[in-house]
Image: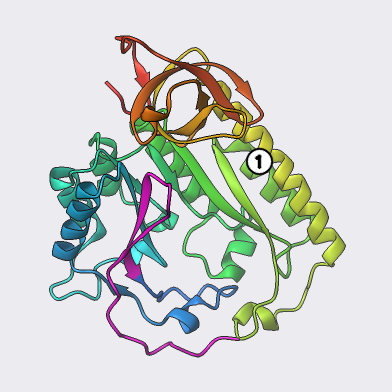
Amino acid sequence: MVTNLRKEKAPIEMAAVTLDGHTRAFLKLQEGCDQFCTFCIVPFSRGTSRSVDPRRVMIALDDLHARGFKEVVLTGVHLGGYGKDLEPPVELAELLEMIAERCPLDRVRISSLDPEELSDRIVEIISGSEKFCPHLHLPLQSGDDETLSRMRRRYARDYFRDRVDRVLASWPDAAIGTDLIVGFPGETGAHFESYFDFVESIPLAYFHVFPYSVRVGTTAAKFTGRVAPAEIKRRAALMRELGDRKRVEFASRFVGTTLKVLLEERGTDGTLRGYSRNYLRVSTQGPDQLTNREVVVEASTVEGTQLVGEIVRPWAARAVCGGAS
């Protein structure tokens, strides 16, 4: 149960979420949502879209750098809605240009953008700057156009494919992830097969699968054509199996290459672990003083869904994946 905050316009408390022992901070730029997808309660629980002034964003980034963080993730409930409520309005692309020019941190990620809000200008800005990690999360939710329409999403699946192709044309090594809902009301077996085939055909690096569940107060809660729980569970399992294959396929592309990896922690097996700029989990050997440092790792194999390799000494002159030089 949540309070209806639809008319909430209070300013956002500007603070970065930083977890003990982590090298990555999450900076919230935006709160609320004006989209009203039929499955989502967020516009009622979080209120209208509100944004943080760009000057405050830049001050926060400077502070994170001074505190020793190496990477920041730009987050929002509906990040694509950033800046429309400011006076004067500011486009997300404008903020990203400021960050590309002035951000002192070397690794910046964008948490999630709806496909219709990933403009060519944004792609040009982020792919043309070494500040931005080649990694985007574009929530698809369904790969069937009829279902997308019932969800009140603002794109068709071919448009989603176009956005993925556009990103990879500029950023060939980029990881593109997505969110998927299975078992939405009215999703027939034929719809799901078409959906599954579409997702299988797209060069995604990973995805999160969510079995549909009713949210009281949403439009979809009133829809007929409910899918049986056992069938939803079966469809979710099939989609997750596909997701595991996608992760391995993406990781395998980078065996034999070098990647810039921000080492974050030592695992229970004694290895140092971290993420490449294009969001691949990487495991390697090294001393503790390398934690919270970006190193170059030559990947030699895939174990599970992560890459394993050795730190390159001296730093390699070969091409480095994920935006390194």
Check the picture and name the quadrant holding the N terminus.
bottom right
Residue drawn at 68 percent across, 42 percent down = 197
Residue at the front extreme of this rendering: 288
Count of numbered marks: 1
What kind of element bears circle 1? helix
Q: Is residue 221 above or below residue 313?
A: below
Q: What secondary structure is the stretch in magenta mostly built from?
A: loop
Residue 138 location in percent, x, y? Answer: 47, 51
Q: Which residues are magenta?
A: 1-30
Q: Amino acid at mark 1?
A: Gly
Q: Residues within 10 Å of mark 1 (few under 14, many from 20)?
A: many
Q: Is residue 70 above or below residue 190?
A: above
* Res 201 quadrant in image: top right
The residue closer to the viewer here, 107 or 115, is: 107
Q: Is residue 94 above or below residue 259?
A: below
Residue at mark 1 = 243
